């Protein structure tokens, strides 16, 4: 349960927990115990209020937490304080919270510097994203901006090369040069990278697939990209 994961993660700054008066069970008991352990205020409220706060009545399970994610930052300010090598993923129109959560988890696991999550066309870092990331999204470097197109503009201004992923690209990722400061743009599975972003991408690469498969899920694509970048940075050679 995302609320319990937040309470058990000391990195997560939890201001309060709101629990529906009708909510009962072992999971709720564990949440109340974890909140008490950290001296976090718990409010009881009508179930309707919990749903209004969570904006997801099907998944809130009668409890919601007010959590500040320490890794959440505005892209422009974050870039201003970063010099040297950078490796980022940029999500363009990825609307499924489960995919977003898995991408964030993968980026952190591979040691990338962050995931750019535009407000337009992307979910907030809410319970579904946190759950799909196995809690990693609570403290991960998630960088916000208005749109993916604005993100690319800011990345260019900060000296990053922007590389788009497309199934139709000629150059495979295995032979794509990865500069010291790079950002990889991943579009949604239906439309790919949006036209506004595609017009400003520096170059393109593809993940070669076989067996009649048209393309990979965006979370799988992110995993391939992230760990290929990690392999390059480590100096390891590709397996024979």
Image (cartoon, rainbow, N blue to C red):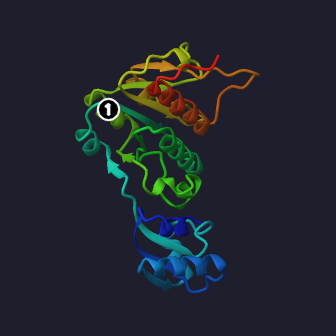
Determine whether 55 is above or below 77 in the image: below
Compared to residue 228, the image places residue 97 above or below, namely below
Instruction: Pick the residue in front: 65 or 235.
Output: 235
Q: Position of residue 82 (x, y in %)?
A: 26, 38
> In this rendering, is residue 1 above or below 152?
below
Q: Is residue 174 left or right of residue 160?
A: right
Residue 43 spot, x, y in % from top left:
46, 84
- Which residue sits at x=47%, y=82%? 36
The residue at the far right in this view is 211
Density class for disc 1 (Cα within 10 Å; few <14, some 14-19, many ≥20) is many
Quadrant of image for the C terminus:
top right
**Of residues 56 and 114, the one drawn nearer to the viewer in this rendering:** 114
* Residue shown at 67% from the left, 22% from the top: 209
Across the whole image, how many numbered discs are drawn on residues? 1
**Residue, x 53% and y 68% (percent of image)?**
3
Q: Is 91 left or right of 168, judged from the image as shown?
A: left
Percent x, y of residue 196: 41, 30
- Residue 69, quarter of the rendered image: bottom left
- Quadrant housing residue 221: top right
Disc 1: which residue? 155
Q: Quadrant of the N terminus?
A: bottom right
Residue 87 position, x and y percent, is: 40, 33
């Amino acid at each position: 349960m995302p609320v319990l994961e937040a309470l058990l993660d000391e990195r997560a700054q939890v201001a309060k927990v709101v629990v529906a008066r009708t909510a009962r069970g072992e999971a709720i008991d564990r949440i109340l115990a974890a909140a008490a352990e950290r001296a976090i205020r718990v409010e009881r409220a009508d179930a309707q209020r919990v749903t209004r706060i969570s904006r997801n009545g099907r998944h809130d399970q009668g409890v919601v937490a007010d959590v500040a994610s320490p890794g959440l930052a505005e892209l422009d300010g974050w870039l201003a304080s970063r010099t040297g090598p950078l490796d980022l993923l940029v999500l363009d129109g990825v609307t499924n919270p489960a995919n977003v959560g898995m991408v964030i988890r993968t980026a952190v696991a591979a040691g990338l510097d962050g995931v750019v999550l535009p407000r337009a066309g992307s979910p907030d870092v809410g319970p579904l994203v946190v759950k799909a990331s196995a809690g990693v999204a609570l403290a991960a470097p998630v960088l916000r901006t208005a749109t993916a197109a604005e993100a690319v503009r800011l990345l260019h201004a900060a000296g990053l090369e922007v590389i788009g992923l497309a199934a139709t690209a000629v150059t495979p990722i295995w032979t794509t040069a990865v500069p010291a400061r790079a950002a990889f743009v991943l579009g949604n599975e239906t439309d790919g990278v949006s036209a506004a972003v595609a017009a400003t991408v520096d170059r393109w690469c593809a993940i070669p697939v076989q067996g009649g498969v048209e393309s990979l899920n965006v979370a799988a694509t992110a995993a391939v990209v992230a760990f290929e970048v990690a392999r390059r940075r480590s100096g390891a050679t590709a397996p024979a």
